[in-house]
Each structure stands twice: as C-alpha cells, then as structure tokens.
Image: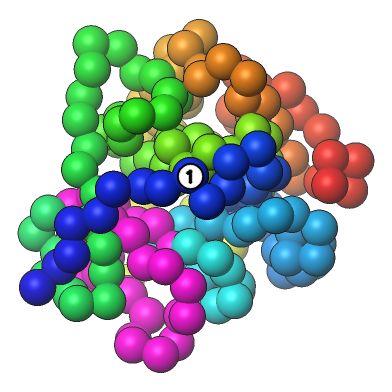
Amino acid sequence: MTERWKPDLRWSGKTVVVAASGPSLKVEDLDGARERADAVVVVNSTWTSAPWADLLFAVDERWWTHAEPLPGQFAGLKVCSDQRVRRSDVKTVQAVKPPAPCLRRGFLYRGTNSGFQAVNLAICMGAARVILLGFDMQSTGGLAHHHGDHPRPLNNPSDQLYAGWIEEFNAAAQDVEPGVEIINASRETALRCFPRAQLEDVL
C-alpha cells in the first residue's frame, strides 16, 4: 500500500536542482549538480541518468506501472501525487488546485506536468534556490526527451502540450514563494519566465 506523505523542510535554505527530461540535458550537467548542489530532484525517466539523485518525482500512475525503476535501482526518495499508485516504496503527496497556478509552500499545486510539480515540491521542502535543468519545453533537435521516447502506452509531448505547460509556468511565475529564486539553467529552452543562467555560474 502506498504511504501518504507530507513534505518536510529538509532542504530549508538550500539550492536544489530539478532535472526534467528535455533533450538538451547532458550527463555532465547532472554530474555538476551532484558535485555542487545541495540536493538533486529527477523527473520521470531522468532517473536513468542519475540513479544517485536525492528524490525521484513522477505524477502519472501509468509511468509508475510501465517505466518506473525496479526496487533497488533508485535509492533515493520516490514521490508521486497520483493516489492510484500502489507501491510500498513510493510515497504519495496530496496535490490541490487553487484558483491560479502558483509555486508556494504549504501545498503542492496540481499542475499539468511532473516538472512543474517537482519544482513546487522542492519549494515545499524549503529550497531557497531552485535550478532548472532539462526544461526545454520544446522539441530540441527533433527529440522529445534526452532518454528517448516513452514506451507505449505512455504519452510523449506535443507542441500543444508544450504550450500549455509554458502558459502554466508563466502564470505561476507571478506567484512564487517570497524569498525563493528560480533559475533556468537548461541548455535549450522555450521557458522564458525565469532568469536564465549557465549551470556553472549558479552552482
């Protein structure tokens, strides 16, 4: 049975890297984050490039059924917001949907993609700086993910999905937890609502 979990403040005041699945993500980016960030969160199948990460977050129950790490392959915390997940090694957190998208502590906003919720989760766990990697929000070099397409029956992103995700981030960027800095260090990105920087300059 899945264990319900409430985020703690273990990363209070810390710098946390959230690595999504965009095709511009490189292994050397993850290695740099491992060496210099206080914590690393991986989204969905990005865990395959960073099985040492502190936390793995994925929303979709189908992902946990068809593409999840087997027990023992990922040693960090595994978290999901889909209450249908039924795995003893995965903790579920309750997600809610306030009137407008936001990135604040105290609750997890039920966003439309795992990357958004992973950023919110890092903030809920006390992060003072969140560094984004692999948040391309676009097809880069004709690819959807750095790890290749998801196998069926999982979905792969479309231009319409990218547009919706960007719109949600744009709205949430207007209501970020006070004192929290979000920096987009993705190598390639269509997400423009957060300051851009090179990873080596912010870590």
SS state under label 1 = loop
Q: Within 10 angstroms of label 1, few (less than 14), some, or many (20 or more) residues?
A: some
Locate residue 155: give its quadrant.
bottom left
Vertical placement of 201 versus 166: above or below?
below
Q: Please report the bounds of the magenta region as a residue range.
A: 56-82
Give the residue drawn at x 58%, y 41%: 12
In the figure, is residue 74 to the left or right of 96? right
Residue lying furthest right in this view?
201
- Measuring 74% from the left and 54% from the top, which residue is drawn there? 37
Tell whether 141 sits left or right of 121.
right
Return the residue nearer the eye: 142 or 99: 99
Horizontally, residue 38 falls left or right of residue 53, namely: right
Viewer-nearest residue: 134 or 138 = 134
Q: Residue at x 12, y 54 (%)?
A: 83
Q: Position of residue 64 (x, y in %)?
A: 25, 69
Residue situated furthest bottom in the rendering: 72
Q: Is residue 77 magenta?
A: yes
- How many numbered discs sit on the rendered protein? 1
- Is there any visible trace of residue 143 in the rendered image? no
Kind of residue at disc 1: Leu
Q: Residue 36 placed where, x, y %?
A: 81, 58
Q: Nearer the viewer, residue 79 or 13?
A: 13
Q: Residue at x 64, y 47 (%)?
A: 16
83 left or right, relative to 39:
left
Which residue is labeled 1 in the image? 9
Does 186 sit above or below residue 67? above
